[in-house]
Amino acid sequence: MSYANYMPDLSDGDNAVAVNALRSAIMRLSRRLKHQRVDESLSPTEMSVLGTLARCGSATPGELARKEHVQPPSMTRIVALLEAKGLVRLEPHPDDRRQKVVSQTETAEAMLEQSRRKRNAWLAGLAEDLDEDEWAKLRAAAPVLEKLAHL
Amino acid sequence: MSYANYMPDLSDGDNAVAVNALRSAIMRLSRRLKHQRVDESLSPTEMSVLGTLARCGSATPGELARKEHVQPPSMTRIVALLEAKGLVRLEPHPDDRRQKVVSQTETAEAMLEQSRRKRNAWLAGLAEDLDEDEWAKLRAAAPVLEKLAHL
DNA sequence: TATTGTTATACTCTATAACTATA
DNA sequence: TATAGTTATAGAGTATAACAATA
């Protein structure tokens, strides 16, 4: 099969339908996920930063800003709030005194675990309305969506 | 196969991984989708309301607030902004004088069409990094995500 | 008395512009 | 001169509380 067969041709009805459905679902679900916080004082982006740190180990504020698609001043504020809550640690960069190294604390790890439980519980509630086939499709698409989000 | 086999057991690693990936991707993609507005003066929720009206025909402010998961005062503001831009029409409710009926204008239909084109263009840009199999998984999961968002 | 929608107000999150320190 | 991060400020979007009109 040639590249043209799966490239998202703008006139391809299937892909257009999928794109519209994805966008609509993403915007709606993101709004509802905001209400599923383990800690009400933790914003979605703060949670996302903790998740990034859990995956990457540590990062500079600039790297975090690029990964989360926010501007540097916004990340400055987010990191400061997380530090005040004891969820991240800030250390001087070993090679460059302009930069800082942000890493998660043990408290953050515990909170992420708690968050995972709450998200699973929320999902379990919705699951009663999904059948096995639908669940399989979600599991298959999850890594693709994650890849899209990182592109 | 029994119900227990596809129910999202909290100890099920596959589902937990999928949930984490989905949540992370949804939050990141929603942030980037905000920057893909066809009209800079139209917020994501305003776009979403227009989409809802396109699907449902018309609705009261209260119904829209529930569907978009925002509080009634927020929807009052959103509807007022959309009306000022000539994108929705407000008419008195036929049976209940407390309520109003919101419906989209022809201008809104044209804007939604333009928006679809822009989203497809954005997706076409990302498509170069997705292979055929990944696209198939996205198409399969799109209706499921839409269903989730409506549950 | 309950419900629909609005007004007034405050809060959260993010961005832009200007600044400091270091490379 | 360029880059990393910060400070100060403004704007967008939403929520809560109090209110008006109608059921």
Image (cartoon, coloured by chain):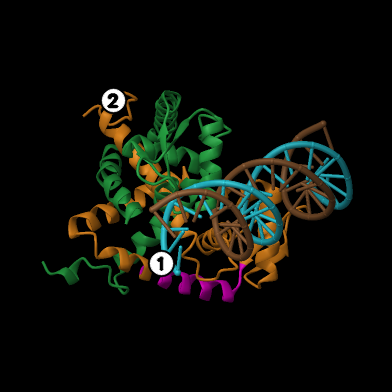
Chain colours: A green, B orange, C brown, D cyan
Instruction: Report whether mark 2 lies on the same chain as mark 1.
Output: yes
Q: Where does residue B79 sit, x and y in percent of width and height?
A: 67, 60
Can you see residue A65?
A: no
Q: Where does residue B77 sit, x and y in percent of width and height?
A: 70, 57
**Quadrant including the N terminus of chain A:** bottom left
What is the number of the mark on residue B119? 1
Q: Nearer the viewer, residue A42 or A25?
A: A42
The answer to whether A136 is drawn above or below residue B126 in the figure is: above
The amino acid type of the residue labelled 2 equals Ala
**Crowding at mark 1 (Cα within 10 Å: few <14, some 14-19, many 20+):** many
Q: Residue at x 51, y 62 (%)?
A: B51
The magenta-colored residue range is B104-120
Q: Chain of mark 1?
A: B
**Quadrant including the C terminus of chain A:** bottom left
State the residue lying farthest toward the left.
Answer: A1
Q: Nearer the viewer, residue A96 or B99?
A: A96
Secondary structure of the residue carrying tag 1 is helix
Q: Residue at x 47, y 74 (%)?
A: B114
Q: Chain of mark 2?
A: B
Residue B12 falls inside the magenta stretch:
no
Is residue A43 rendered to the left or right of residue B144?
Answer: right
Is residue D19 rendered to the left or right of residue A146?
Answer: right
Q: Which residue is mark 2?
A: B4
The answer to whether B138 is drawn above or below residue B37 in the figure is: above
The answer to whether A27 is drawn above or below residue B127 in the figure is: above
Q: Where does residue B83 sit, x and y in percent of width and height?
A: 68, 68
Secondary structure of the residue carrying tag 2 is helix
Q: Earlier in the sequence, mark 2 or mark 1?
A: 2
Q: Nearer the viewer, residue A18 or B55?
A: A18
Residue B105 falls inside the magenta stretch:
yes
Q: Where does residue B128 sit, x and y in percent of width and height?
A: 24, 65
